[in-house]
């Protein structure tokens, strides 16, 4: 029989996500080095040299390796903290069911209303429950960039009804922020302009840094 561990028996978020945090910091360094491979030769060229040969290969390599690096780190964290994984999954099932119940109640209230504008089918209770978590994570991530104190207050407000937990919201915020950084790296790999590739690698860094912050944050 599987038992859910008490919250006090579980690690702080900084330790729970230690491998991911380490991988994110490694990725920050790789982005800097990739940009340096473009800017360094330009900076070192003599003033009279008009054309400077640079390479965007490191930008491409960072882009191709980033997602795998982070996925491996996540799996290592899960392996290191199995009790946390058990608790998180049980909490996720509970809050998902709670969000579904709210959506179903709302559907019951609106059952006599049209199915959607122009006949578009409205989201199911399960889809609504999944979107609620994604939206909450996105909101907290965006708010944290502006004002961390505001983001903390928002997170506490979002969990007040019991359909979400702080850990769920922060984890989703980490995912959202990482996704934005990875998209910038994908653009860096796709462009043929070395300078643009370097700029895109650097533009990913603030999101990766924010992901580190969110993965480390422990509001309890």
Image (cartoon, rainbow, N blue to C red):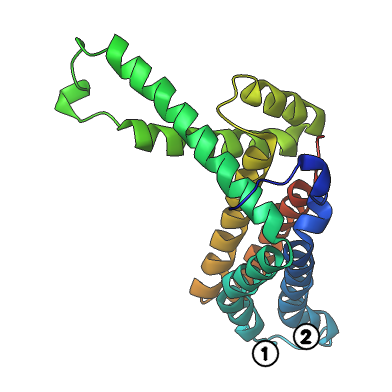
Q: Residue 76: name its quadrant.
A: bottom right
Rendered residue at 29%/14% (across/down): 108
**Residue 26 vertical position relative to residue 150 in the rendered view, above or below:** below
Residue 148 percent across, percent down from the top left: 79, 34
Q: How many marks?
A: 2
Mark number displayed over residue 41? 2
Whether residues under marks 2 and 1 lie with C-beta atoms below 8 angstroms apart, the answer is yes
Mark number displayed over residue 53? 1
Q: Is residue 53 left or right of residue 220?
A: left
Please report whichever mark, 2 or 1, sits nearer to the chain's N-terminal start: 2
Residues 36 and 207: in front is 207
Residue 74 percent across, percent down from the top left: 65, 65
Q: Mark 1 Cα within 10 Å, few/some/many (few <14, many 20+)?
A: few
Mark number displayed over residue 1? none
Q: CA distance from mark 2 to mark 1?
A: 7 Å
Q: Residue 136: name its quadrant.
A: top right
SS category of the residue bearing label 1: loop
């Amino acid at each position: 029989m599987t038992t859910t561990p008490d919250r006090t028996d579980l690690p702080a978020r900084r330790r729970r996500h230690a491998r991911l945090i380490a991988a994110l910091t490694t990725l920050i360094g790789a982005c800097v080095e990739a940009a340096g491979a473009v800017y360094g030769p330009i900076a070192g060229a003599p003033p009279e040299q008009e054309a400077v040969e640079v390479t965007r290969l490191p930008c491409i390599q960072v882009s191709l390796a980033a997602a795998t690096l982070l996925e491996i780190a996540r799996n290592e964290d899960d392996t290191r903290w199995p009790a946390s994984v058990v608790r998180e999954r049980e909490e996720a099932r509970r809050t998902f069911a709670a969000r579904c119940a709210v959506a179903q109640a709302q559907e019951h209230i609106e059952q006599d209303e049209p199915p959607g504008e122009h006949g578009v089918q409205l989201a199911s209770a399960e889809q609504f429950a999944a979107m609620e978590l994604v939206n909450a994570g996105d909101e907290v991530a965006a708010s944290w960039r502006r004002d961390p104190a505001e983001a903390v207050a928002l997170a506490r407000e979002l969990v007040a009804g019991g359909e979400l937990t702080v850990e769920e919201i922060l984890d989703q915020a980490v995912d959202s922020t990482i996704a934005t950084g990875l998209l910038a790296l994908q653009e860096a790999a796709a462009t043929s302009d070395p300078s643009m590739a370097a700029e895109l690698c650097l533009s990913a860094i603030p999101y990766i840094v924010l992901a580190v912050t969110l993965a480390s944050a422990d509001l309890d």
